[in-house]
Image (spheres, grey):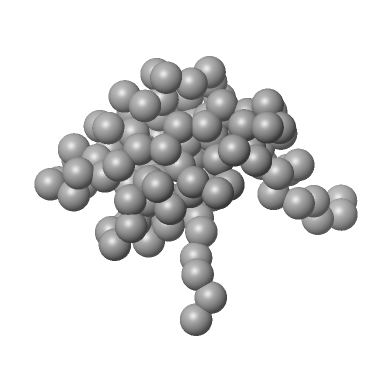
């Protein structure tokens, strides 16, 4: 097996990014990392979850996939992880990244 690589090299290098907030935070929680990723040449879209229904939030992710080049990496935290799991079956998705906070 190869050496472990940083996430930016391993998962994001040739993919587009789409980031989701969680149940208690909106897409603006990524405001500090988005400019860094864009500065590295990545397309980044951060969407808001409506929290009306899981199906509605998954549909919003799939609509957002149309705004970036494929393949896409979906990033989610908390409830956003549930949403990207469901949306990750889309052919335009190359991978999923689940974020967690430290306790």
Q: Where is residue 57 in the image (x, y as percent from the top left)?
A: 24, 40
Q: Residue at x 35, y 38 (%)?
A: 47
Q: Which residue is drawn at 43% across and 53% down?
A: 29
Q: Which residue is drawn at 28% across and 38% down?
A: 58
Q: Position of residue 19 (x, y in %)?
A: 45, 42
Q: Residue furthest bottom?
A: 103
Residue 89 visible in the displayed image: yes
The relative height of residue 70 versus residue 93 in the rendered view (above or below) is: above
Q: Position of residue 38 (x, y in %)?
A: 62, 31
The relative height of residue 2 versus residue 62 in the rendered view (above or below) is: below
Q: Position of residue 86 (x, y in %)?
A: 33, 43
The answer to whether residue 92 is left or right of residue 48 is: right
The answer to whether residue 56 is left or right of residue 47 is: left
Q: Quarter-wise, where is residue 4 in the image?
A: bottom right
The answer to whether residue 69 is left or right of residue 59 is: right
Number of marks present in the image shown: 0
């Amino acid at each position: 097996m190869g050496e472990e690589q940083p996430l930016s090299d391993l998962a994001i290098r040739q993919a587009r990014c789409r980031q989701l907030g969680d149940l208690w935070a909106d897409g603006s929680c990524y405001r500090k990392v988005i400019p860094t990723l864009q500065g590295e040449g990545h397309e980044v879209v951060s969407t808001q979850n409506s929290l009306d229904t899981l199906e509605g939030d998954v549909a919003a992710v799939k609509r957002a996939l149309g705004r970036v080049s494929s393949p896409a990496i979906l990033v989610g935290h908390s409830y956003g992880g549930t949403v990207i799991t469901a949306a990750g079956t889309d052919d335009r998705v190359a991978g999923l990244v689940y974020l967690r906070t430290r306790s």
